[in-house]
Amino acid sequence: MARNKLDIKSYGGFFPITVLCLIILYAPLLVVTVYSLNDSNSITNWEGISFRWYLDVFVGPESEKFRTAAWNSFSIAIVAAISSTTIATLSATAMVRGGRFKMRSASFGLINLPLMVPEIVTAVATLIFFNAIGFSRGYLTILIAHMAFCIPFAYLPIAARMQGIEDTYEQAAMDLYATKRQAFTKILLPLMMPGIISGFLLAFIVSLDDFLITNFVKGAGVETLPTAIFGSVKQGIKPNIMAISTMLLGLSVVMVTLSYFISKTDKTK
């Protein structure tokens, strides 16, 4: 006799607990979004709906600072995402398609270690490493730190995608006289592409949104959007900060949503 599947929704209190969790998670974000549309100069007084603070981000007194920070953030995120995705793809190929080899379990642990270690520990360790080798902090140190930190975020969707692809495709290609390289580039790589794109998007948004590691390894005068926002908040919360935070939130939601749907693409197509 087959067992009935466990339906967690049938337990008493499931719905109110779910609603409570959603409120705790998303109510602060909703407040920031709503007050970014406030026409008032004060964040505590509501004076109607206006997009003036979104315009202020681009042409206001602090627009030059935010523009430079945005350039740093996006350029670092793109390069870090490309580099970490490339490394993650090669790592996933070795781990999933490479068979058993010495130190395989240790390698898997090292790849996923940044996900389990508190980010503050990673930030301090990275800072100590750069100081130990005498590397001047600045744009390049942020880029290197982001490349290393983003690898596991890119690796997980890529490895999951590859594990779902049977090796019979590559075997069939090699039976038709394809080399291992051709079987990989012509058969396996296209099938992996949704996972690779998903990994790239996740790595990109993790790099773009990172504050803690960036704040430790950045040099004087180098700012990204999260650190620029933090610096402005220390002088007082302004409505334009809410506007730029809302835009970053929207971009993050779009990226994560794209990553989710791309990773769900049928791997046989």
Image (cartoon, rainbow, N blue to C red):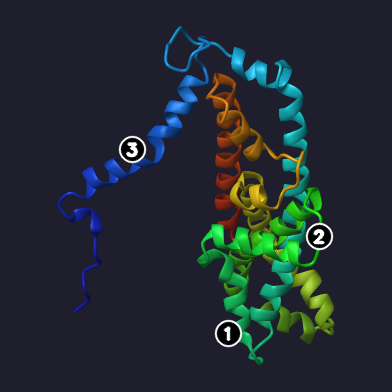
Which numbered disc, 2 or 3, marks the residue that appears first in the sequence? 3
Q: Nearer the viewer, residue 267 or 253?
A: 253
Q: Point out residue 14 in the picture as x, y percentages from the top left corner.
A: 22, 50
Q: Point out residue 143 in the picture as x, y percentages from the top left corner.
A: 76, 53
Q: Are marks 3 and 1 in contact (CB under 8 Å)?
A: no
As drawn, the label of residue 240 is none
Q: Pointer 1: residues within 10 angstroms few (<14), some, or many (20+)?
A: few
CA distance for labels 1 and 2: 32 Å
Q: Residue at x 70, y 76 (%)?
A: 93
Q: Amino acid at mark 3?
A: Ile
Instruction: Quarter of the image for the N terminus: give it.
Output: bottom left
Which numbered disc, 1 or 2, marks the residue that appears first in the sequence? 1
Label 2 sits on a secondary structure element that is loop
Q: Pointer 3: residues within 10 angstroms few (<14), some, or many (20+)?
A: few
As drawn, the label of residue 23 is 3
Q: How many marks?
A: 3
Task: Kindly tell me whether residue 27 is visible in this rendering.
Answer: yes
Q: Vertically, is 237 above or below 268?
A: above
CA distance for labels 2 and 3: 44 Å
Label 1 sits on a secondary structure element that is helix
Q: Amino acid at mark 1?
A: Ser
Q: Nearer the viewer, residue 36 or 202?
A: 36
Residue 144 left/right relative to 115: right
Q: Vertically, is 132 above or below 265?
A: below
Q: Point out residue 218 in the picture as x, y percentages from the top left corner.
A: 72, 48
As drawn, the label of residue 135 is 2
Q: Which residue is mark 1?
A: 105
Q: Residue at x 51, y 67 (%)?
A: 116
